[in-house]
Amino acid sequence: MTGKERVSIRFVINGRPVSMEVDAGETALHAIRGRLGFKGTKEGCGMGECGACTIVVDGRAVNACLLLAAQLDGRDVLTVEGLDSPLGLHPLQEALVEHHAVQCGFCTPGFLMSAYALLKENPSPSREEVLRALSGNLCRCTGYEQLLRAVEAASQKMNPRR
Ligand code: FES
Ligand code: FES
């Protein structure tokens, strides 16, 4: 084999269609953060252990460092940059601020994306379900209680009649 194999992909990111050529071995993290400039998707361990790079692909939270960019072809991708709207912050973002669940902020986008995917699939999760959904996201600053409370508060705000 000579040189690097290149692959053409098309996908939607934060509601916008994108076409690009990627190396066959390039990670989704490199394509999204490094080349498309969505810097909210953080690079931590690069090994699937910290969750800082979490994005939502077709509704599921995944580690962008473990996904090949080529696997984004045809997918619908959401990063933290696509979470708020012209009306303001997403309720999860508001809840993290209100519950003092953000300190250095490095882990925050990953937590938000994992929590977003959880609440999409399960609008009223139990504490155990929240814990399980966030178990792949590490935070070195806050302790996890504030993060858990924030996700529960956002869930209640988004589904007030539960
Ligand atoms: S950078 Fe992807 S899980 Fe740590
Ligand atoms: S707020 Fe600093 S790592 Fe979580």
Image (cartoon, rainbow, N blue to C red):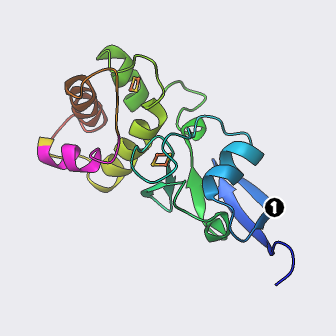
Residue 5: image location, x then y, percent: 80, 75
The quadrant of the rendering that contains the C terminus is top left
Is 152 magenta? The answer is no
Left or right of 3, for residue 137: left
Above or below residue 138? Residue 69 is below
At 26% from the left and 46% from the top, the residue drawn is: 135
Residue 33: image location, x then y, percent: 67, 43
Left or right of 26, for residue 89: left
Kind of residue sitting beneath label 1: Met
- Name the residue at the right extreme: 2
At 34% from the left and 23% from the top, the residue drawn is: 95
Quadrant in which residue 140 is drawn: top left
Element under label 1?
A: strand
Is 135 magenta? The answer is yes
Q: Residues within 10 Å of mark 1 (few under 14, many from 20)?
A: some
Above or below residue 108? Residue 24 is below
Q: Nearer the viewer, residue 61 or 76?
A: 61
User: Which residues are drawn in magenta?
Assistant: 128-137
At 59% from the left and 40% from the top, the residue drawn is: 82
Left or right of 150, for residue 84: right
Residue of label 1? 20
Q: What count of labels does the image hold?
A: 1
Residue 60: image location, x then y, percent: 42, 59
The quadrant of the rendering that contains the N terminus is bottom right
